[in-house]
Structures are given as structure tokens and as C-alpha cells.
Amino acid sequence: MERVPIQLTVNGQPYQAEVEPRMLLVHFIRDVLNLTGTHIGCDTTSCGACTVLWDGRPVKSCTVFAVQADGGEIQTVEGLERDGQLHPVQEGFWEEHGLQCGFCTPGMIMTAVALLQENPDPSEEEIRKAIAGNLCRCTGYVNIVKAIQYAARKMRETAPATAGIAGGE
Ligand code: FES
Ligand code: FES
């Protein structure tokens, strides 16, 4: 089958590849780039295990062709950690036991990261609404909500200090 050249940035790294037009973004991420933190739970846009950020917005990568994301910026769960420091959302899942088998966790975390970028102080209802497209078969969601609340608190505590330094006043 004909192959199409694409160019993508994934977790800040530029990549070029030639892919079949039918290749799904999730398969590109897992099978071509070997970033297997992004999971496939259903392949039918139901479970959210494959959620990544595409130009900052959460998408189910089993529902996007790799060629559609040409020129875009993708962030996967592997790109969250900085210098050995977990992202506050990852830390929240650790501290609040927001997982059991962990299969839904990468997608859940990416959805939460996108939510907190847009809404730093979400209510419980807003959190539950944001993760409505991410299914978890183990936890009952209570600790996932707590994990996201933990991350929101932590990000709010650290954000003003950073803004003060950036403002230089
Ligand atoms: S694998 Fe994409 S939504 Fe389930
Ligand atoms: S922790 Fe098992 S599916 Fe969510």
C-alpha cells in the first residue's frame, strides 16, 4: 500500500516517518515509536485508555489516523515526568491510590492533565465530567477523583510562586 510521509513532534522530539494512510495514531505511537505507555483497550472509541494530547487537547488516539496528526504536537504519558520528578497528576495517582491494575491509568492521567490546564480548580462534578470518556473497571473512580484533586491542589500551590518569579516583581 502507498505510504505517506508525516512529521510529528512527540513529547518535544521531532519525528519523520512514512506510514500507510490507514495507520491509527495509537499504532504509530506504540508500534513505530515504541511508546507503549499509551494503551489500547477497545479500539472503538469507548474506553479512553489510548488518550493522548494532540496540540494540547485530549484525543482518543485509536480514533485518529496518524496522517491526520501530521504537523501536530503529541504528548503521551511518557512525556510528563521532568528530570526524574513525576508530574503532579502522576504523583496524585501514586499518593491517593488512583489505580489498581493500571490499564486505564495513562489515558486517565492525560485527560486529567488537559482538564487542569484548562481549569486549575475543578469541582468534583467537573472532574467526573472530564473523565466520563475514560473507563476504569477496577477502582470505582473515587480515588481517581481524589488523585486529580490532589494534583489540582499541588499545581495551584506551586503556580503562584512561579508566576511571581516570571513577573520579576
Ligand atoms: S482504545 Fe481508544 S478508546 Fe479504547
Ligand atoms: S485501574 Fe484497572 S482499569 Fe482502571
Image (tube, grey):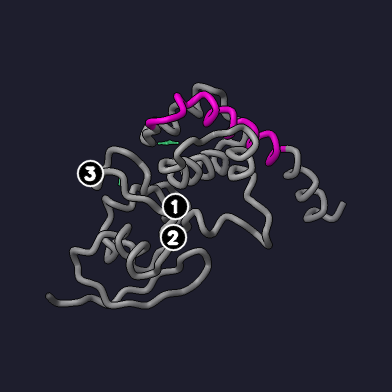
Q: Looking at the image, which residue is at 40% across and 33% down? A: 136
Task: Check the image and report above or below for 64 versus 100.
Answer: below
Let me know if residue 140 is in the magenta part.
Answer: yes
Q: Looking at the image, which residue is at 39% across and 69% down? A: 33
CB atoms of marks 3 and 1 within 8 Å: no
Report helix, strand or loop for mark 1.
strand
Q: Hey, what amino acid is under mark 1?
A: Leu
Q: Dot 3, how many residues are within 10 Å of its Cα: few (below 14), some (14-19), or many (20+)?
A: few
Mark 3 / mark 1, whichever is N-terminal: 3
Q: Residue furthest right?
A: 169
Q: Hey, what amino acid is under mark 2?
A: Ile
Residues in magenta, as a range: 137-156
- Mark 2 vs mark 3, CA separation in Å: 20 Å
Q: Nearer the viewer, mark 2 or mark 3?
A: 3
Name the residue beneath numbered marker 2: 74
Tell me where residue 125 appears, x and y as whole percent: 50, 22
- Mark 3 vs mark 1, CA separation in Å: 18 Å
Q: Nearer the viewer, mark 3 or mark 1?
A: 3
Q: Could you say which quadrant of the image residue 113 lies in?
A: top right
Q: Looking at the image, which residue is at 45% across and 24% down? A: 140
Name the residue beneath numbered marker 1: 53
Instruction: Report ligand 2 position as a quadrant.
Output: top left
Report helix, strand or loop for mark 3.
loop
- Mark 1 vs mark 2, CA separation in Å: 6 Å
User: Overall secondary structure of the magenta stretch?
Assistant: helix
Relative side of 139 to 84, left or right: left
Name the residue beneath numbered marker 3: 44
Q: Could you say which quadrant of the image residue 133 lies in?
A: top left
Relative side of 61 to 101, left or right: left
